[in-house]
Image (spheres, rainbow, N blue to C red):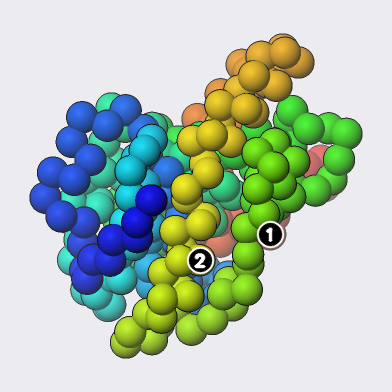
Amino acid sequence: MAVQFHQGDLPDGLFAGAASVAIDSETMGLRLGRDPLCVVQVRGPEGDAHVVRLNRPAYDCPNLKRLLADPAVLKIFHFGRFDIAMFQLHLGVTTGPVYCTKIASKLARTYTDRHGLKDVTRELLGQDISKAQQSSDWGAAQLSPEQLAYAASDVINLHALKARLDEMLIRENRMDLAQACFAFLPHRAALDVAGWDEIDIFAHG
């Protein structure tokens, strides 16, 4: 697998006909409204990983926006809540339909509290991924080879993880519950963007 870099947007027709893509993003921090969206990485079920350095602050990326909103393409994330909220806030699109391997892990792997991408990938696929570049400067004018490799590593295994987690969800009779969670995820992200990120509106208090 190679890593393809793109400035501003995905190429025309890149994922035409794809039933699903794996997606992740990189930002200047983890606070909505303060930290900008900088990079989005995408990969189909096979082939290369595509890393897009977004043009800020215009975020003129019609091909990426079209893909995120395409109802015929399943978008696979790990902790999609954050990425989807960032896309709503900065790109002005509601992402869907979606699948989140972190939610799937929490529903299927109840024997552990380790649901980070590194831990899930190590257990289910027997692969180690490095998180060394996670906190690097994603707003830089040029991305380093190490940053590009890191960005790609966050999407290359998501299809395989989905397949393994789907087996576990079906085995534990929790697939319907997982699907309901995935369907709600864009709404949860909208609540985050609107200011209810730290408040559980379903709580009694």
Secondary structure of the residue carrying numbered label 2: helix
Q: Nearer the viewer, residue 134 or 121?
A: 121
Which residue is label 1 attached to? 198
Q: Position of residue 34 (x, y in %)?
A: 50, 78
* Residue occupying the point 21% across, 56% down: 10
Q: Is residue 87 above or below residue 26?
A: above
Which residue is label 2 attached to? 150
Residue type of the residue flagged with mark 2: Tyr
Residue furthest out toward the bottom: 141
Q: Is residue 151 above or below residue 62?
A: below
Q: Is residue 186 visible?
A: no
Residue furthest out toward the left: 12
Q: Is residue 58 visible?
A: yes
Q: Position of residue 156 (x, y in %)?
A: 47, 48
Instruction: Select label 1 or label 2 by which is in front.
Output: 2
* Residue occupying the point 80% across, 48% down: 114
Secondary structure of the residue carrying numbered label 1: loop
* Residue occupying the point 78% across, 32% down: 109
Residue type of the residue flagged with mark 1: Glu
Q: How many marks?
A: 2
* Mark 1 to mark 2 CA distance (whole Å): 29 Å
